[in-house]
Every structure is written in structure tokens, then in C-alpha cells.
Amino acid sequence: MTASLRSLLILGGLAACSAPPSEDQAEASIFDAAFAAGDSWQCSSRVELSSLWAEVRDRHDHNGDGQVTLAEYDRGEVRFRNYDRNEDGLLDSSDFPEDAHFNGFNPMILGHADSDGDQQVTRAEWSAFQASLDADGDGRVVKEEVQQGIGGWTSDWPLFLLSFDQDGDQDFDEADLEMTFRDQDYNGDGVLAGAEMAGWQPTVQYERIEPPAPGEIAPDFELAYAADPARSFRLHDPARTRPVALIFGSYT
Amino acid sequence: MVIYIREAHAMDSRLPMMFGNIEDPVTYEERRVMANFSSKELGMEIPAVVDELDDAVSMAYQGWPERLYLIAPDGEVLYRCGPGPFGFDPDGLEQAILDLR
């Protein structure tokens, strides 16, 4: 989301009805950070599980014994279970293997690899998906091949690539496939399914409904301002004479 | 108007990413603080309002993880982009605003 919010800095001027943005600003790439310094593929969507454990421990291991109990963890049982990978009721380093990674875009790409639509991804499906991108058949899928193979249906193709270069050698190949299954096949049954595809249990399940479409009346709401919670904004304000742009988002 | 909603990639969420190691707010005040932090960190001057923790407004608009709308003074939806991240379309919103002129 940070990248999306950054692209809105361009719109800040429009919202205030000032001059349109320059072409350079409008074409600024959201992947600049990810592809800085040549072909670097690292970006913050790649989570080192050991680093994640360090954060969790720092925040919640109040007695410093190297474990976090549900009693020490004060943010609710659902989130605690998100972390408790081995389901032993404790959070410790065993839930966050030293050399394992998780990438926040994994669930999306895994869904595309599910060719038979049975809500689980087998090694064969994943290999076939990888092979479908390997245009020159050399066993390595590199940036240009991903762009050719996926770029036609999503502009976020570099993020898919960043998800699966597990060993950081700027391709994805058999070694990365093995690491993906090693890191995410929590129950070791050889397929990625359910929570394994999600990586963590969801904190919130969102009901999919049809949002208001152009021509329809937008649902009314009244919400407090972040900077001044004593004041609120109501959408259906009879005094409003100008259109309003609604920008839904968060820092992450 | 920014409508600040549930985090897209909190570290304790379904899709963790380490943008500043943010935990998903569990109180309204935490989310309000995050909204102000976000605006300050990103240098955004567009005012922000904060969705309640039941995510009612976000749900009604299917705004999570991010989405853009343009609403006429009478409440009519003039523009709606697709769901983020892949459908998030600042260019589309820009054009919709320019089309008003």
C-alpha cells in the first residue's frame, strides 16, 4: 500500500484543483525501490521469518525467557495463532525457522498456479507454472521471461518475481521451488493448501459484496478525522457543492 | 479524503510485509495514530478520516486493501477503480477529475 499511497502524492495537487502533474511524476515507477542498484530483487515484501520473530519477541516476550505465551501476547488469540506455526500454544524460534522466508505476494501467485482449481497447489502444478514462464527452456525463469509471461495481465509482474526468488540469485528455478515448498508446506503433505497458501491464518475475513458502481448512490457514512477526532466528515452533506475523491488505504 | 482502513500488510496479518514492522491495530485509537503516522511519513496533505474497527465503511465500499472513488455532491458515484493492488488506478481517478472540467 505504501507504493499506492505514494502514487497518490501526484493526485494531491488535483484534489486541491491545482495544476496537473508533470509527465515525469505521472510515470514514476512504483518499482523503483525494488529494482534499485541494478537488478536487485530485494524489497520489503520479502519477510525473513527470523527477523519477524525478533520483532515479535522484542514486543511481547516480557519475561525474557525466549518464548511468548498467550498471556504475554496482548493482541488477541487470532493474531497469536497466526504466528504459532507448529500449533504448540507457544511462540518461539521454532515457529520462525532461521533461513525461511515468506513473501506477502505468495498467495496471489500460488492461486494462479492452481491449474485444476482444487484450491491446492502441488509440486507438479508449481513446476508446470514455472515451466510455462521459462521461454528459453534453460530451467531458470528470469526477469524478462516473467515480464513476457505475466506482464500481459498484470503491471505488478516484478512483485510476483520478487516473491519466488527464495535464494536471491535473481531467477526462480528448481532450487527456489524446493525452498517455497519447504517454507510453506507446514504439515509436510507435499501440497500447499488453505492456510499454507495464505502463509498465516487471516485476522479478518472480508465478505465479498458488489461495491457501489458509477451511476449508483454511494452509501452514506460519517467518520472522525484522524488529526481532530472531535470533528467528523459526512459523505451526504447537503452543504457540499464539490465532488469528493475517496481514497481507501493504509500505511502498509 | 483519505479513508484510513485496516492495514494491508501488518506483520501479524495474512500477508505480512515489513514496512516499518506495523502490527494490525486492535483499538480505534491505535488506528487513528497509524493514520496520522502514515500521513506524516508519506508527506500526504490530503485529510484523513478513520474507519471504525468493524471496517463498516471499508466493507460497504470494498475498499480494502486500497481503492479510489469519485463521488458527486449529490452522492452519485462518478468513478470507481478496481480492487487494489492490481486495480488501483490513480490515472483513472485523475482522468475522472479532469473530465469534470
Image (cartoon, grey):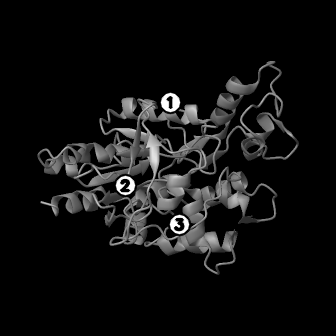
Give the CA distance from mark 2 to mark 3.
Answer: 57 Å
**How dense is the environment of label 1, judged by Cα within 10 Å: few (below 14), some, or many (20 and up)?**
some
Q: Residue at x 30, y 61 (%)?
A: B74
**How dense is the environment of label 3, judged by Cα within 10 Å: few (below 14), some, or many (20 and up)?**
some
Q: How many marks?
A: 3
A118, above or below A234, in the image: below
SS for tag 1? helix
On screen, residue A52 versus residue A233, left or right, reads right
Residue under circle 2? A236
What's the amino acid at mark 3?
Answer: Gly
SS for tag 3? loop
User: Closer to the camera, A15 or B66?
Assistant: A15
What's the amino acid at mark 2?
Answer: His
**Dot 2 and dot 1 within a common chain:** no
**How dense is the environment of label 2, judged by Cα within 10 Å: few (below 14), some, or many (20 and up)?**
some
Residue under circle 3? A139
What's the amino acid at mark 1?
Answer: Val
Give the CA distance from mark 1 to mark 3.
Answer: 48 Å
Residue B64 visible at all: no
Which of the numbered marks, if any, corresponds to residue A231?
Answer: none
Residue under circle 1? B33
Do the residues bearing badges 2 and 3 touch, measured as CB atoms within 8 Å?
no
